Image (spheres, helix red, strand yellow):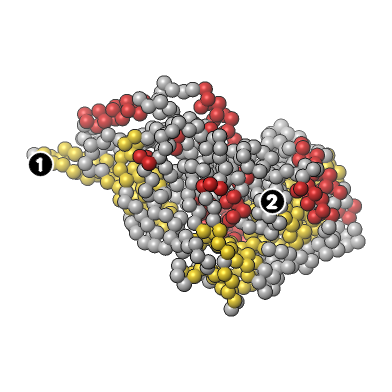
Amino acid sequence: MSSPSSSMKPSISSWVFRLFLAAVLLSFPGPCSSSFSPPITISSIDEFQNYTAISDFRILNRRVLVECPDANPYLQINVSKTSSLSDEEYLTVTVSGVLLPAETDWVAMISPSHSDVSSCPLAAIFYIQTGDISNLPLLCHYPVKAQFVSNDPDYLSCKKQECKKYENGKCVAVTCAGSLTFHAINIRTDIEFVFFAGGFQTPCILTRSNPVSFASPEKPLYGHISSIDSTGTSMRLTWVSGDKEPQQVQYEGKSEESEVVTFTQGDMCGTEKTSPAKDFGWHDPGYIHSAVMTGLQPSSTFSYKYGSDSVGWSDQIQFRTPPAGGSDELRFIAFGDMGKAPRDASAEHYIQPGSISVIEAVAKELSSGNIDSIFHIGDISYATGFLVEWDFFLHLINPVASQVSYMTAIGNHEMDYPDAESIYKTPDSGGECGVPYWTYFPMPTVQKEKPWYSIEQGSVHFTIISTEHDWAESAEQYEWMKNDMASVDRSKTPWLIFIGHRHMYTSTTSLGSSDFISAVEPLLLANKVDLVLFGHVHNYERTCAIYDHECKGMPKKDEDGIDTYDNSNYTAPVQAVIGMAGFSLDKFPDDDDNAWSLSRISEYGYVRGHATWEELKMEFVESNTRKVGDSFRIIRSQSS
């Protein structure tokens, strides 16, 4: 049977419907109206472009939504599996009975499935972070992901046809169909698929699927481990469940009961401008369980499982403890700015396209048995107020974070918000103001609201700060940094690595804070910090031994041609930006000639470190090829 574009011309009623729909949408004030384009919308988009990922999909909740006046009796949406979903599924969603396929037809995955425009607040609230000022949210709950039906190459050409009506033996109503694949993970709530017309800018609902449920919404999931001290004998396991009752981690014939915490919308930031985390980006996080495994041996392999008899257990998982501080050898991975990306063709509110290749490459490193720990130095999930994104991120990192110590530093996209306790008052966290971060990733800090700490593994002392909290000389964190680095016993841990999220030096246009440099850099020099690792800029760049924007020492090539810094006669720290683990890459300018910049790579990847008593060797590894793009060594005589 031929397609509607040939033998079957669109009916008059179809054209009338399209014209009527356009008239309805244009009758509302807001971005749907061609005659309504106030300067504030443009300026707010420009103002917040750099940190809110403005896109048509992200600002869906600020679009006017209507029910499509569609009299089509044939329209259906079907899901390949409607109940007892496993913890990870690839679902086929089929839209059929479509009379006139359009490029603007799309399907969204919504959670919770009971979200209904009729129950959404109709007040005119300005969500300035989204760059839009409509007065009606799209849905009470933000679409988790969405795809245009034209992702099915047969949809617009109507190759999947069905005749729905015959008159006098002749087909007078041909309908079209399209199928999409959605990746779904257990987020503890039902999901629903909604078929929209009008694209992301003028959406209206055509039809909905029935709710689709997970088999075990209370199941323990997404376990990840972290060090609680420098001994390598105790490890914290943190996981997520829909069950508020304490569960257990069972390991090596022992059992420890979990502490259970959660957070609510009331814990999120947002006053003058309602934040995504406070409103349309909210998703119930369930319950976060944490338990400490004790009595372990450093640099050793153990196994564990977590859960309970009532809600089920995880698989048995093997993990490796890091070497104790003061021992010789440490092998670690470090990166920043990872986030996550969809494993289907969906649009999502914020996508970090390199994240999957990086985590898969790190997983291969881990399978070699040569990795002791991982350091993720800020901009963790990029959920930025869309809380379901934390589940997708935890799912992404689970294969590696469940097997070795996964240590983190806080970044701007976890912390910053106008009424948060951060020194930068941008809305980068979407209203999260640090709460989900330190709930999901409890680090060995004095208090969770003071996310700075130090830890020793092997021959390295790591000083890990929050660049988002006050670091001025009068601040508590400054005094802590000063005391921590001054207390390092270099006969025990000869290498001192300083870690934070926001950078000091970069060749891109993203300037480091001069106040941060003037306050903190003298501490690095005074305490003979060997290596400084920052993120925030989305590429890889290595400096000379730098202080006050000048090279104080240059490396020399060793017999293998590797840049080698000899810190026997210490001059200044080497700094490296390593924010290339997922977020869209920053390119380097062609006309920059910074003498202190020795290596620049704009590729996705991670840094691989190997520390012994004799040397600290670092390599930048490109995730797509596993090739080493840059390598350098820092050495020091035992007596220095």
Quarter of image, res 615: bottom right
Badge nearest the viewer, 2 or 1: 2
Relative to 546, is 300 on the left or the right?
left
Task: Check disc 2: other Cα within 10 Å, few if <14, some if 14-19, many if 20+.
Answer: some
Picture residue at 51% right of the left edge, 58% below the top: 287
List the single residue furthest toward the left. 168
Q: Please, what secondary structure does the residue beneath circle 2 have?
A: loop
Q: Earlier in the sequence, mark 2 or mark 1?
A: 1
Picture residue at 47% right of the left edge, 62% below the top: 243
Picture residue at 81% right of the left edge, 62% below the top: 493
Give the vertical position of 611 relative to 540 (above or below).
Answer: below
Position in image of residue 86 (x %, y %): 41, 61
Position in image of residue 311 (x %, y %): 45, 67
Q: Mark 2 points at which residue?
A: 450
Q: Which amino acid does label 1 sit on?
A: Gly
Q: Name the residue under label 1.
A: 169
